[in-house]
Image: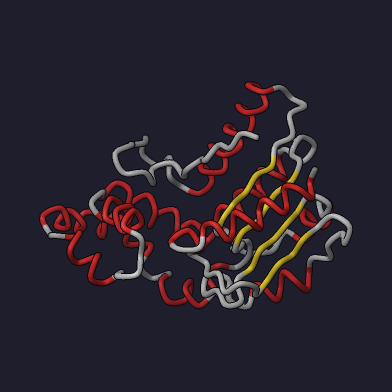
Amino acid sequence: MSILAHSHAGHTPGFHTSPGSHRLLLQIQSAIEAFDAIKVEYGPDIPVTVIGHSIGSWITLQILKARSDTISGVFLLFPTITDIASSPNGRALSWVFPWAVTISRIANILRVIPLSCILSWIFRSWPAHQKSVLEGLLRSPSSILATLSMADDEMKLVRDLDTQLLQRNNHKVWMYFAQSDDWVGDSKDVILRSFQPDKGSVRVVHGHHGIPHAYCIEHGEQLADQCFDWLQALD
């Protein structure tokens, strides 16, 4: 089994992209191109499963929409696939995202601040490598611009749940929800009510193990175990 980790364009400090390439619709294009490249490299019959986290779940569904005949399955982790702007975090933070350009320029001052010490004090429980990732982001104005601009698009474009897409592909969809998730909010109940999974093929897990939306900070291995179980079910 091979794994390709595909980051959002413009979100990686030190890797600059062309202006506008970090916008949400171009992120979808980039993800589809990555999927197509895998098929070209390994052959059209190779089974490919796409895993997306948060807004990555919505992008994953766009790949499924475009390549439903050639995709084996999709795992949606903490899926923000409908009406993000109405989630608790969406309501609290939506006003920030239109100021992406201004905030990214102001962030230049962070380059001369001892961030390592500050972050170590604020996020004491975080592993050292996760604090390092956050520091790298905060020291990269271009990455801040990319993340906030994309978030602004998310608030505007991720609206109605694509129930028809889910139902057409219900034998290919797996979902994992947190018990409480301020980026999903009441949308979890909307999704669970609207989506009638194929009981023989689909796994919908929610509220187990106390794993939060930002699972990658301290709960990566637990989610990896869940995804491995799903991969075995695909076989």
Which scheme is used to colour this image of the protein? secondary structure
Left or right for 144, reference 227: left
Q: Is residue 107 above or below residue 25?
A: below
Where residue 115 appears, as percent x and y from the top left, is 18, 60
Q: Residue furthest left?
A: 112
- Please tell me which residue is depicted at 63% across the width and 78% down the height of the picture: 186
Q: In the rendered image, which quarter contains the C terminus?
A: top right
> Which one is nearer the viewer's eye here, 130 or 152?
130
Q: Is residue 129 above or below residue 72?
A: below
Q: Quadrant of residue 222?
A: bottom right
Q: In the rendered image, which quarter contains the N terminus?
A: top right
- Please tell me which residue is depicted at 60% across the width and 68% down the height of the picture: 83
- Please tell me which residue is depicted at 30% across the width and 69% down the height of the picture: 123
Where residue 137 appears, as percent x and y from the top left, is 30, 52
Q: Is residue 202 above or below residue 4?
A: below
Q: Quadrant of residue 151?
A: bottom left
How many badges with numbers are in the image? 0
Where residue 166 appears, as percent x and y from the top left, is 77, 56
Left or right for 125, reference 184: left
Left or right for 216, reference 144: right
Where residue 108 appears, as percent x and y from the top left, is 17, 53
